Structure formats: C-alpha cells, structure tokens
Image (cartoon, rainbow, N blue to C red):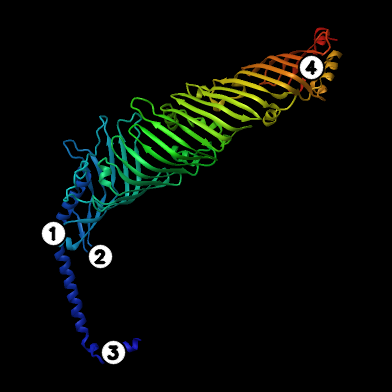
C-alpha cells in the first residue's frame, strides 16, 4: 500500500512541487499567524472585561458585592480560559458581612461571543471556596435575597445573568448561629461537586460530596422548576443523601416558605445503628443491638402537621407498618400519635447499659434528653411476638406515652404461658438516673411453664393462677441490681402442686424433734387446692407476709423474712394435718435456699 502511494506521488509530479523551501515557508507563515492570533485576541478579550464580567456574575448570584485581588489571566490555547485570582464576597449595605472567600476561579468562554462583544463565561470552577452562613443574635442573616429571586408570578428579566455550570473543588461550608444557646455551628470541609442551571426557566441539578466525621457523604438535588421553589411556591423536586452510615431520599413536591410543605415518597436507612451512633457522636459505640433501621413512607407536611402514611419501618430484626401523625402547634410541644403493627420485637439485644451516658457532660446525651423531653408521644403498638429475656409474649397490644419527662409503656393485653399478661412500666419524671416503676399482672397462666422459662428450681408452687407484681427502684436503670428493688408480690394458685416436697416425710421429721435438711423430705409432691403468697421487698430483703397452702394432705402456713442478697432464710411455719383435733406442728426454717434447714419448735424450746 505504501509503495503504491509513492508511485502515485511520482506519477503526479506532486513530490517535485513539495520542495523543502515550500515547507519552510509554510511553517513560517503558520508561526506568524499564531503569533498574530495570540497578539490580537487579548485586544478583543481584555483582562479588564473578564474581571468586570466575573464580578457582575458573582454579584448577581450572591446578592452581595465581590472584590477580586490581582489581575485575571486569559489563555487561548488549547482552549479559551480565564483565571481569576483570590476573590471575596461581602453582603451589600452599610455594614458588610463576609459571605464567601474563593481561592481561585477559572472559566471558559466562546471566541465568537467575544468577537461579537459578548463577555459570557461558562463552565466556571470555584477552587478552595469558603462559604459562610451566619445568623446574628437579632435573627438577621448575612446572606440577603439576590436580584434574580423574583416574587411569585413575576417574569424573570431576560438580562439577568444565568448560572450555567459551576464546579466546586475543595470547598468549605461554615454555619454560625449566634442565636443558638450552645453556640454550636457546622463546619464541613472537602466539598466537591457540580451545580448546573442553564437557565432560570430550566432544570436545576446539583451533585456534591464531602467528608463528614471521617465518612464520605454524597448529596444530589434535582428540580424542574427551581425558580418557583426558591420563590416559595410549590415545585417538584427530588433529593438524596448517601453515605456508608446513612442513606436518605425524597421525591415529591414542596416549597421553602416560612411554613415549608412537602408531599412525596421518603426513604431512609442505616445498615448499622452502632455505626450510625458512632458517626453522630464521634466515638465508638458498642452498646447498640446488631442490625440497622429503614423507613419507607409517604410523607405529607401541612402548616402545623406532618403525616406518615403507608409507613414501613424496620429496626433491628423487627418490621412494622402503620400511620403516624405529628402535630406542630405554636407554643406547644410537638405531638406524635399513631399506630404501629410489628411482626416481631426482640428486646434481648438492647442492654440497659446503652441508656447510660458515656460521660456526665456527654453533649449527645443532653441533646437526646432535650429531644425526648420536648415531645409528646402517644403511639399504639401491636406485635405478633415480643421477646424480652425469658419472656415470650404473643398477640401484644400496648401503648407508649411520652409527655415531657414522663415516659410510660402500657401493655393492655398479651398472651404468655397460656395466660393473659398486662402491665405498665413508668420511668421517673426526674430522669433515667432516678429509676422507675413496674407493674405486671399475669392471669390464668400455667406457672410451671413460667418457672421453667425463668430457670427457677426447688420447692416452688406451680399451677394455674394469678401473679401480681408492683416493683420500683430509685437507682439508675443501668445500675439497678436485685437489692435496689422494692415493692410487693401477690401469688395465688388453684389445684396446683409443690414439687420436691413430701409432706408425710416432712411431718415425720418434725415430730421426731430433731434438726433436718429440707432435702430429706424432697422425694414427693404436695398437691394443694389453693396457695396464696404475699410478700414485700425492700433493702435486699423479702418479707413473707403470708404463704398458705391448703390441700387434702394438710395445711401449711409460713411467714418471715428472706434476706435474698445473702441467700439466707428466717421463716416460721405451722403444719396442720387433715385429722381434726390435732395440735398443728410448728417449725423454723433457716439456712439458705434451696438447702434449707428445718428446726422443729420442740427443739428450739427444749433443746437436748
């Protein structure tokens, strides 16, 4: 092929015409034209014009006053480009306040537009910008409404500068709020991304990323009617936030008025609650249960309300559906009402240690307390299954109420051990550090199954009956032990039995008038028609006010104290046989449970 090409050149005599001197002249002409091009273009596109154009654009965008330090540089090869040195933007007015500081600005431009006298800059890049949003103590903002933000219903003037494409490299956002009581602010560095708005009547899209708390966070925003949105009118938009700890998205309609409105589809999820908490607090978190959470709902906001419909909630291993209404009335605490239906709730992975603040001055803990105390919540809950330690409840109907510092959980109905369990847990109004109260009532339950689930062994009465508990503690919940609990217990059974207790062997040993171990009378079972036990708890000691067993083999009654912090016993009892006219046997129970030592009264009164 190459040989054929040379043959064609030789036959056409073109090779002779392209002599070296012609090549030299052609190259020289090219150099002259290039030099003339570079010498003439600066006369058409001056640095003064570029500076004025950029300042005008910055002023139109921000509504403030820009100031460029130094002279811009204009480059025409390999593409027309203007570079603006360090720039500052301050608010307009008699008392300028800082809005932004920009390390460098680059922008491309069209040569044809420049030749026509149009100084339009495109594809603008802001390098190392620092944007400051500041609210003073009087509520005024340093950023004011720009000229292009017209009132609703007003046509945008055609001479207003468009935004075009703006790229940010290594930006920083500072938010300072002098009205905040804690003086907290926001400082986000490492912001990079692109803002695209070709025309005021067209579509706006933005996509940025930054590193927050050591995690890369991406944010995207798209709006087909941006001017209407910024002018506080309803417009369709969608936005999303993506990061390893948390993802969030919303698509629907809304506005940015003083009473914001939004209606659309909201999704939010976190793969790990522990990771999310650690990211928020800035310290490792180990007390949270495994798993994360997700929310998928249709959200609608009104002037003073927020409604979540078709709500699908998943947290840990539990999923729920329902509806929530949030009322935001002026002068009142926000109020949340609604219903949530869970399939399964497992509380075993949530230790009480997670309620404990990491430090006494833990800022996140104070924020959480203020957040909870600032709401009124009344939510109805239902669950097909609830796991809490040895408790396995089914068909649970409950309610959660939070009103200021008053927090309560009411179980209206549930099934447990073939019985019905209801109850109430109330936290102290003085805070979690002051403990709380627990009330529970278990009716018509199989207490043999209850004792087995709790792993209790020994001579303990079982059967079907009723158990009522009324307990409280004044200690922090995460530090409460069994000796810190006080309250009362009532336990009634019918047609039950007392395992590991042979009443006939026990009677014979008492009559012998010698000390003996309860285990010596454990080869049997005492059947009873009724059993009634009443006890109170305080200071690590249980006072047995009454324990009465009535059965065909005899009646037993026991009273006394059980210092359960030491495991010891101090009880007095009587045993009345079924035979009429016989004097009841009396005895004393000491030692420790379940290895109790029985002392007949005859031994105590007349020791041998």
- C-alpha distance separating marks 1 and 3: 49 Å
Left or right, residue 249 beside residue 570: left
Residue 42 visible to an observer of this rendering: no
Compared to residue 448, the image places residue 198 above or below, namely below
Residue 20 visible to an observer of this rendering: yes
- C-alpha distance separating marks 2 and 4: 104 Å
Q: Secondary structure at mark 2?
A: loop
Position of the C terminus, as image quadrant, is top right
Residue underneath mark 2: 78
Q: Secondary structure at mark 1?
A: loop
- C-alpha distance separating marks 4 and 1: 113 Å
**Numbered disc in front, either 3 or 2:** 3
- C-alpha distance separating marks 3 and 2: 36 Å
Query: Which numbered marker is on residue 598?
Result: 4
Counting residues from the start of the chain, the first of labels 3 and 4 encountered is 3
Nearest the eye: 411 or 173: 411
Residue underneath mark 3: 8
- C-alpha distance separating marks 1 and 2: 22 Å
- Few, some or many residues within 10 Å of mark 4 (<14, 14–19, 20+): many
Return the x and y of residue 13 as percentages of the image width and height.
Answer: 23, 90
Return the x and y of residue 46 as percentages of the image width and height.
Answer: 15, 58
Query: Which numbered marker is on residue 117?
Result: 1
């Amino acid at each position: 092929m190459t040989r054929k090409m040379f043959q064609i050149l030789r036959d056409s005599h073109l090779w002779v015409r392209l002599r070296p001197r012609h090549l030299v002249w052609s190259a020289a002409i090219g150099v002259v034209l290039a030099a003339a091009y570079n010498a003439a273009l600066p006369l058409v596109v001056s640095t003064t014009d570029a500076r004025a154009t950029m300042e005008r654009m910055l002023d139109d965008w921000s509504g403030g006053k820009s100031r460029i330090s130094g002279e811009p540089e204009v480059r025409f090869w390999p593409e027309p480009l203007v570079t603006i040195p360090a720039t500052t933007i301050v608010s307009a007015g008699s008392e300028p306040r800082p809005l932004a500081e920009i390390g460098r600005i680059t922008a491309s431009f069209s040569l044809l537009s420049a030749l026509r006298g149009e100084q339009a800059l495109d594809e603008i890049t802001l390098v190392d910008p620092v944007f400051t949003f500041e609210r003073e103590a009087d509520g005024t903002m340093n950023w004011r409404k720009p000229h292009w933000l017209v009132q609703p219903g007003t046509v945008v003037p055609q001479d207003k500068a468009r935004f075009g494409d703006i790229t940010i490299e290594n930006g920083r956002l500072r938010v300072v709020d002098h009205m905040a009581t804690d003086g907290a602010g926001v400082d986000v560095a490492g912001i990079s991304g692109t803002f695209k708005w070709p025309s005021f009547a067209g579509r706006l899209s933005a996509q940025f990323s930054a590193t927050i708390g050591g995690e890369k966070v991406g944010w995207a925003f798209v709006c087909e009617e941006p001017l209407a949105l910024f002018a506080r009118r309803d417009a369709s938009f969608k936005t999303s936030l993506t990061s390893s700890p948390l993802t969030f998205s919303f698509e629907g309609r809304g506005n940015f008025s003083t009473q914001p409105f939004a209606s659309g589809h909201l999704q939010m999820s976190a793969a790990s609650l522990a990771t999310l908490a650690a990211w928020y607090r800035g310290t490792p978190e180990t007390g949270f249960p495994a798993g994360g959470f997700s929310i998928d709902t249709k959200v609608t906001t009104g002037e003073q309300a927020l409604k979540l419909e078709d709500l699908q909630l998943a947290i840990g291993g539990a999923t729920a559906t329902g509806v929530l209404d949030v009322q935001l009335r002026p002068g009142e605490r926000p109020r949340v009402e609604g219903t949530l239906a869970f399939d399964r709730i497992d509380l075993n992975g949530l230790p009480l240690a997670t309620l404990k603040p990491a430090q006494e001055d833990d800022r996140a803990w104070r924020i959480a307390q203020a957040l909870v105390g600032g709401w009124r919540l009344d939510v109805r809950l239902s669950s097909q299954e609830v796991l809490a330690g040895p408790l396995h409840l089914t068909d649970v109907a409950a309610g959660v109420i939070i009103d200021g510092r008053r927090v309560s959980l009411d179980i209206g109905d549930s099934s447990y051990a073939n019985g019905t369990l209801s109850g109430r847990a109330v936290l102290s109004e003085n805070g979690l550090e002051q403990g709380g109260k627990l009330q529970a009532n278990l009716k018509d339950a199989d207490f043999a199954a209850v004792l087995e689930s709790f792993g209790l062994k020994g001579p303990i009465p079982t059967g079907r009956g009723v158990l009522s508990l009324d307990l409280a503690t004044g200690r922090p919940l995460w530090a409460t032990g069994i000796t810190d609990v006080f309250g009362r217990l009532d336990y009634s059974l019918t047609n039950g039995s007392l395992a590991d207790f042979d009443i006939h062997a026990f009677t014979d040993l008492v009559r012998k008038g010698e000390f003996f171990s309860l285990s010596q009378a454990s080869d049997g079972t005492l059947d009873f028609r009724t059993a009634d036990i009443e006890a109170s708890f305080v200071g690590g000691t249980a006072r047995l006010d009454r324990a009465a067993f009535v059965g065909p083999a005899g009646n037993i009654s026991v009273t006394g104290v059980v210092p359960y912090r030491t495991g010891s016993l101090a009880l007095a009892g009587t045993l009345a046989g079924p035979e009429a006219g016989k004097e009841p046997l009396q005895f004393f129970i000491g030692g420790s449970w379940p290895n109790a030592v029985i002392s007949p009264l005859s031994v105590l009164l007349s020791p041998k």
